[in-house]
Image (cartoon, helix red, strand yellow):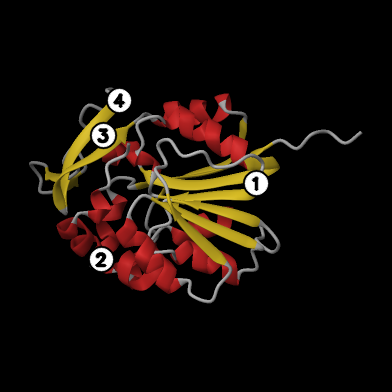
Amino acid sequence: MAQNIYDDAQFFDGYSQFPRSREGLAGAAEWPSLRAMLPPLSGLRVLDLGCGFGYFAQWAAKAGAAEVVGLDLSENMLDVARRNCADLPVRFARADLETAALGDGAYDLVFSSLAVHYLADFDSFCARVRAALVPGGSLVFSMEHPVFAARATPDFVTDAEGRMVGAVLDYLREGERLTNWIADGVVKHHRLISTTINSLIAAGFVLDHVEEWAATDADIAQHPEWEKERYQPMFLLFSAHLSAPASA
């Protein structure tokens, strides 16, 4: 079972203070890039894995999705998500993404934001997502960039000339990382970019776009605190699809 850190009171309180928690998608720096990877949602059946506070589910429903289902392991997250999506055609359920059966051909789009780096078995995740999608269905997801996530404490260091440097440690050693982020002992799982890509290919996905998100000049003009995002990639974004069967 994946670690349910978001139901830890200290962690949940700390996480709730972040801009993406308070402001929704508008507070998520990478959201415009993720949104550009999405297909038109009108009439689609959408599965949101690691739905958190329900902000994407809310957006998808308002964008015309026919059905939106959000899954998360945290009851704290689900409580907030249900409030945020009241009166919208969205259903939420508690599920462990490490093992949950996601259905068989039930969805046109699977979306996941910053959740897969909590999973130990990404191959299993890809296989279950594939099963959940219809032929031609899409998978769009984000994760912590492996350069950022490879070390347990992803802080910057300063070189001899006073420049900020994002050090990389143990990048080639895949596996569990224990981090002290908000609360002590948060469990994440580091895997190479190549491992992630090859897992998607092995599961039958066709890659459409891969993006190592970085703040632009326009981003930094609006959010000067994002200046540090120029020193190393923090997010890695993927869009992929399943090939549709050839017509007779």
User: According to the image, label 3 marks what residue?
Assistant: 150
Q: Secondary structure at mark 1?
A: loop
- The secondary element bearing badge 4 is classed as loop
Q: For the residues marked 3 and 2, what is the alpha-carbon distance in whole angstroms?
A: 25 Å
Classed neighbour count for the residue bearing mark 3: other residues with Cα under 10 Å, few (<14), some (14–19), many (≥20): many
- Compared across the picture, whether 175 is left or right of 152 comes to right
Residue 42: % across, % down: 69, 64
Q: Nearer the viewer, mark 1 or mark 3?
A: 1
Q: Are marks 1 and 2 in contact (CB under 8 Å)?
A: no
Residue carrying label 2 = 16
Give me the C-alpha separation between circle 4 and circle 2. Answer: 29 Å
**Residue 39, image quadrant:** bottom right
Instruction: Identify the amino acid type marked 1.
Output: Ala
Which residue appears at 45% of the width and 55% of the height? Answer: 93
Q: Gap in Å between the C-alphas at discs 4 and 3?
A: 8 Å
Residue at mark 4? 174
For badge 4, the amino acid type reads: Glu
Of 173 and 245, the residue lying toward us: 245
Q: Residue at x 54, y 35 (%)?
A: 128
At label 2, which amino acid type do we have? Ser
For residue 152, above or below residue 38: above
Percent x, y of residue 40: 67, 60
What amino acid is labelled 3 in the image? Ala
Q: Which residue is mark 1?
A: 106
Q: CA distance from mark 1 to mark 4?
A: 32 Å
- Closer to the N terminus: mark 1 or mark 2? 2
Q: Is residue 101 above or below residue 115?
A: above
Q: Residue 228 at what x, y percent from top left?
A: 25, 55
